Amino acid sequence: MSSNDTAYQKCINPECAAEFGCDQAMFKCPKCGELLDIVYNWDKIQTPKKLSDFARRWASRENPLDFSGVWRFRDLLDFCPDQYKVTIGEGQTILQQNDNVATYVNMKPGCLYLQYEGLNPSGSFKDNGMSAAFSHAKMVGAKSCACASTGNTSASMALYAHSCGLKSTVFIGSGRIAFGKLSQAMDYGSQTVQIQGDFDDCMHQVLGVCERLGLYLLNSLNPFRLEGQKTIMFRIIEQLGWELPDWIVVPGGNLGNSSAFGKAFMELKELGLIERVPRMAIINATGADTLTDLVNNKKLKWNNANVDQKIIDDYYADLTVRKFSPHTCASAIEISRPVNLKKCLRTIDICDGVVRAVTDEEICDAKAVIGKFGLGCEPASAASIAGLKHLREEGVIESDCRVACVLTGHMLKDPNVTVNYHKDEQGPFSNPPIEAPNDLEEIIKLIQ
Ligand code: F0G
């Protein structure tokens, strides 16, 4: 299937609701400047009768689209013909049930699952979104692309761009990116521009650059990226034997994931493929907690798509007056003006969501626990476990709920935070190296 009449782009502002074909590349509504959504004409798409029907695709894994953890669900993101679809083996990620981490957050055995998105080709969940967005970029004939990034978007974009033969430019805040990620952007051949500013400054500049030079934008403002990220939820359901978890816990930065996840559940419900929607917890770092502040303190709501813009404008104006720049060791989520804020509010509405902020100390401790008992992750990812710990202490999440935490990025992305935590004995889970003389007897004494 997959022809242009299966999907279209639509402005999320109900007063505008402008519609555009998927054959156009635009990253904000050209009429009113609001976010765009991909909307499907489900009656023109052959969707499965039940989610477990997707299991059939495992039998034909020699087809790269069936192997891809994104495209094996292609009927649920049917916006481009197969000939344009890009895959480099993304989405071969696992959902690990982890009782040791469950104990740390005071949950019952068998109840906590970790969705390891660090296993993607570039080491983060971004590859799910890039495979979808680069397919769109190919469909519209893009030759050059760009993004602003706290690191993972740039690593993933650089990898897909070189696979697809597109020229790519990344904008990163000087000193605001973990070394693993910076090394990827350079090694994959992206032009790398370090701006003297933070992520929000880079985002502002990249929009100007894309508009002036006609570059294809790969930030999560790009609605096609979010279509790919929906599949993280499909894979969690798949790995639970086509059953739903009770809760999804995810870190929040630019709020692309949370937006995509809510849309995924909204569509599955609309299609009758699920009967209920899991709840969602979105976790900020305290040093970059715009969402938490706006939702929990300023009572900002989706309100049936009529979001109170004045609350947001006043909040951002205050950030500007205070010259506020976010700071957290979880550099991936060091963002104070999240571009997908409104779509995330929609997710909170759909999923009866909650928002919390966790300190850097809590993030580092949770990260060490995940490292000790799981596959490890980068600091931003560990915010999900630190947030779950809060929600368990508050009693918002019960100890016997089935909870899936999304671990968004690989442990090796940010070696500095990890090494410092252990070497400088920053927390209760520090595991510092032992200094030993070059002497067998002394070494044996020390390690016993
Ligand atoms: N976790 C990791 C490892 C990330 O890299 C990001 C975002 C997030 C969580 C937050 O996800 O934006 O969907 O809420 N990184 C972006 C980047 C901003 O540029 O790499 P979100």
Image: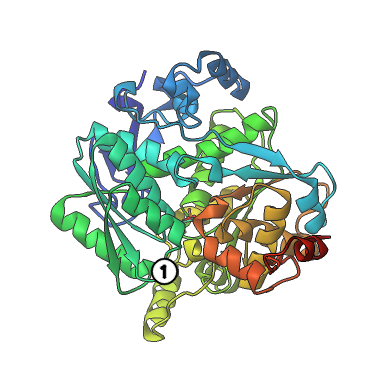
Q: Quadrant of residue 169?
A: bottom left
Image location (x, y in percent) of residue 234: 57, 34
| Quadrant of the snapshot with the C terminus | bottom right
- Image spot of residue 4 (x, y percent): 29, 27
- The correct choice, above or below, for 428 with respect to 412 in the image is below
Residue 422 in sight in this render:
yes
Residue that lies at the very extreme toward the left in this rendered image = 213
Q: Who's the residue at 51% across and 60% down the image?
A: 414
Tell me: residue 48, above or below residue 233. Answer: above
Q: In the rendered view, would you say 60 is above or below 266?
A: above
Q: Which residue is mark 1?
A: 176
User: In which quadrant of the rendered view does residue 381 lie?
Assistant: bottom right
Horizontal relation, residue 14 to residue 192: left or right = right
Which one is nearer the viewer's eye here, 39 or 366?
A: 366
Res 222 visible? no
Q: Position of residue 257 (x, y in %)?
A: 50, 49
Neighbourhood count class around disc 1 (C-alpha, 10 Å): few under 14, some 14–19, many 20 upward:
many
Q: Quick one: SS at disc 1? A: loop
Q: Position of residue 316 (x, y in %)?
A: 40, 75
Q: Is residue 127 left or right of residue 164?
A: right
Q: Residue at x 49, y 21 (%)?
A: 47
Image-quadrant location for residue 423: bottom right
**Quadrant showing the N terminus:** top left
> Looking at the image, is 228 positioned above or below residue 367?
above
- Residue at coordinates 24% horizontally, 37% vertically from top-left? 165
**Residue toward you, 319 or 300:** 319
Q: Residue at x 39, y 71 (%)?
A: 175
Amino acid carrying mark 1 in the image:
Arg
